[in-house]
Amino acid sequence: MTERTGREPSYAELMAELSAFRTDHMQGRPSDRALAQAVGVSPTTIGKWLRADQFPQQIDLLLALVRGVRGQAEDSGLTDDPGAARLLDLQQWRSVYRDEARRRADGTSAAVQAEQGRAALQRMRPGRPLAEVTDPFALEVHRAVDVPAKALPVLPEYVPREHDRRLAEVVSRAAAGASQVAVLVGGSSTGKTRACWEALTLLRGQGKPWRLWHPIDPTRPDAALAELADIGPYTVIWLNEAQFYLEPDVLGERVAAGLRTLLRDPRRGPVLVLATLWPESWDTLTGRAAPDAHAQARELLQGHKIAVPDAFVGTELDALTDMVNRDPRLDEAFERAQDGQIAQYLAGVPVLMDRYQEARGATKALIHAAMDARRLGAGPRIPLALLADAALGYLTEREWGHTGDDWLQLALDFVTTHCNGIPGILTPVNTGTPPQPAHPPRCRSSPPGRAGAAVPAGRLPRPARPQAPRRPDPPNRLLDCRRCTRPPRRPPGVRRRRLEPRPLPRRRPTPQTRRHPRQSPHGSHLHQPPPHSAPRRPPPRPSRHPRRRRRRGWCRLAAGQSAGGWGGGAGHCVVGP
């Protein structure tokens, strides 16, 4: 092997050294034919590459050739030599290939070499041509609720909102030639990533071919730092969940600084940065603290925020009404989503169903107990004590033997986990104060001895909802309706309303009482019976169980509002439909 000088070798020099290494140290192995099979080209092409008569048009093919030679060298025990290890270093080959491609692109002596160099540089740019980006789920767009219908697109029909109009203005400026940044800030599953996906439509029909770069491997900040310096013009930088790129103290600041440098370089523009953030992450990255750990990120993000609302309102709901007949997924979301949270419903139900299918043992028994309670007529709020007691009847002896003492807390942790912006299978609520959506809650705690409450997710999709739990019949302890409907304890100081006896109907006069229009023969009023008549029947006693109003302070068994946490007063909660 030849001795290296201080300068980096050229592509031709390095290729000649590789060819000589194969011939002198490995007796010509692997052969051209073996290398051709490993690379996927003809043996003639391999020979031209090794003689530097032809320049590979793809870096991956060249790296496959070097890997084939390195594998043979490792089998022969030659990689322990520092010179051989340096010759077979893949990073060095990437650098030399990039320099040769630039030299050929800048050369004017041979038009063919210049065209080859430009094509190679184009292929080496990070990202993929936007025309090839057709899978929204590869860019982390949430999957929508599944319905039993045919010939539906992978995503529901889109309803543009106010933030889409603002985002379209930013994308249009980037298409006109100015580097831009758009940061969509909103809660979980409010439609941030879907809005960015729809905005790409404005760039697909442009004269210049745009590319999309979504760095994720090996980690998000590492992937961004590895290729950020190679980003070229007409590139969309896709930073979904941008907190993963920018929040790490050291790497995040380096990524933010690199993006700021890219945006300020007119030779590398236009570029478009599309980022999404949760409100908590926005506050972390843009707030000032001591020490200031996110100064670069704050300068990158400020002034580019586009707020994404949690719910559909006003004209947005009107536009959605016109689309429900064309897409049953929108129809279901419009019917069942609470408070206009259409996007959360569409994205959260698949996750909710997956968690139901994943539930095992005591966790699934607790879910089935709640489902049976609703099926048997229990109200929207059921005591947690009832469900915990009834769930044991759904377990086999083997399942009960594998259940630990903390099974109830583990089951509650599983079923109360939120699913892409919607409540979990059960939702804890507070039974201390009845829910009053139209008025602010009272500032008082639950009465002593009262339990918390929960709301099991009443939206298991109709097609996927089991028609019956695993047991054909629910346990007997669940059939005691009084345990599901007993009224709540009266708050201290509140007296029961006394029920007065119903007044007797007025008697019709008899012939003996008609002698005087106003006076009976006994001198009493007409309706007073004579002394010798039969005694009057005593007034009816009030019922021992007067009709009570339906109780409200228990938990709901439908995905819905959470009014508090587990254990509003005593430490456990109530679940109900």
Image: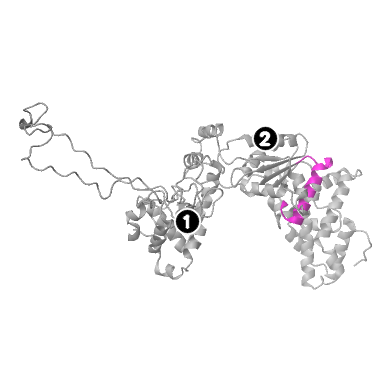
Placement of the N terminus among the 4 image quadrants: bottom right
Q: Is residue 328 left or right of residue 184?
A: left
Q: Which residue type carries mark 2?
A: Arg
Closer to the camera in the image, 563 or 8: 563
Q: Is residue 540 left or right of residue 25?
A: left
> Which residue in the protein does label 2 denote?
166
| Residue 569: numbered disc | 1
266 is within the stretch colored magenta: yes
**Magenta span main SS:** helix
- Percent position of residue 367, x then y: 44, 56
Closer to the camera in the image, 565 or 394: 565
Closer to the camera in the image, 113 or 454: 454
Q: Residues within 10 Å of mark 2 (few under 14, many from 20)?
A: few
Q: Is residue 260 left or right of residue 161?
A: right
Give the residue drawn at x 36%, y 53%: 484
Seen in the picture, residue 365 relative to 296 is either above or below; the reply is below
Q: Quadrant of residue 469?
A: bottom left
Give the structural element (helix, strand or loop) at label 2.
helix
Q: Residues within 10 Å of mark 1 (few under 14, many from 20)?
A: many
Nearer the observer, disc 2 or disc 1?
Answer: 1
- Percent position of residue 393, x then y: 38, 63
- Percent position of residue 86, x then y: 85, 65
Q: Which residue type carries mark 1?
A: Gly
Seen in the picture, residue 330 relative to 79 is either above or below; the reply is above
Give the residue drawn at x 28%, y 44%: 499
Residue 30 visible in the current orientation: no
- Image coloring type: one colour
Q: Which residues are magenta?
A: 246-271
| Residue 312: numbered disc | none
Residue sticking out furthest to the right: 5
- Distance between the Cα atoms at labels 2 and 1? 47 Å
Residue sticking out furthest to the top: 517
